[in-house]
Image: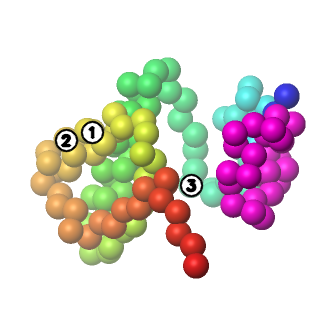
Amino acid sequence: MNFNSTVKGSSLEGFYPAGWDFEKIDACIGAPETITERQAQWNEGFTPVKCESLGEFETYMGHEIAMQIRLAKERGEKIAFILPVGPMGMYKWVVYLLREWQVSCEHVFTFNMDEWADG
């Protein structure tokens, strides 16, 4: 069972933009037990980090977002993020860390993943 074999007739049928190739998207992902094994298409600087709980994920994700904001500020660069609207717990860590480090967000631009843009 997978997305492609169950979407027909579901409330998600016709929901996604025309042209999305779910077979190709599905091919990017291996079996769940191999999810942390390096894949050829990964950026060389990417390494997955396993989290044991949602709280741990929120902490790591919040730290990573805050760190990228801080590093861009130190380089004098603007930075843009496409951020998920949930889970939300990571954002309290972003705010906490940026306040602790006294880093403003005047150089940051964000978009929510649930916002759609079209012609």
Q: Disc 1 designates what residue?
A: 93
Residue 86 x, y percent position in the rendering: 43, 39
What amino acid type is highlighted by mark number 3? Gly
Q: Disc 3 designates what residue?
A: 45
Label 2–label 1 contact, CB within 8 A: yes
Q: How is the image coloured?
A: rainbow
| Residue at 14%, 48% in the rendered image | 99
Q: Is residue 102 left or right of residue 78?
A: left
Residues in magenta? Answer: 4-28
Q: Is residue 109 visible?
A: yes
Query: Magenta includes 71?
Result: no
Q: Main secondary structure of the magenta part?
A: loop
Badge number at residue 13: none
- Number of numbered discs visible in the structure rendering: 3
Q: Disc 2 designates what residue?
A: 96
Residue 14 x, y percent position in the rendering: 74, 52
**The N terminus sits in image quarter:** top right
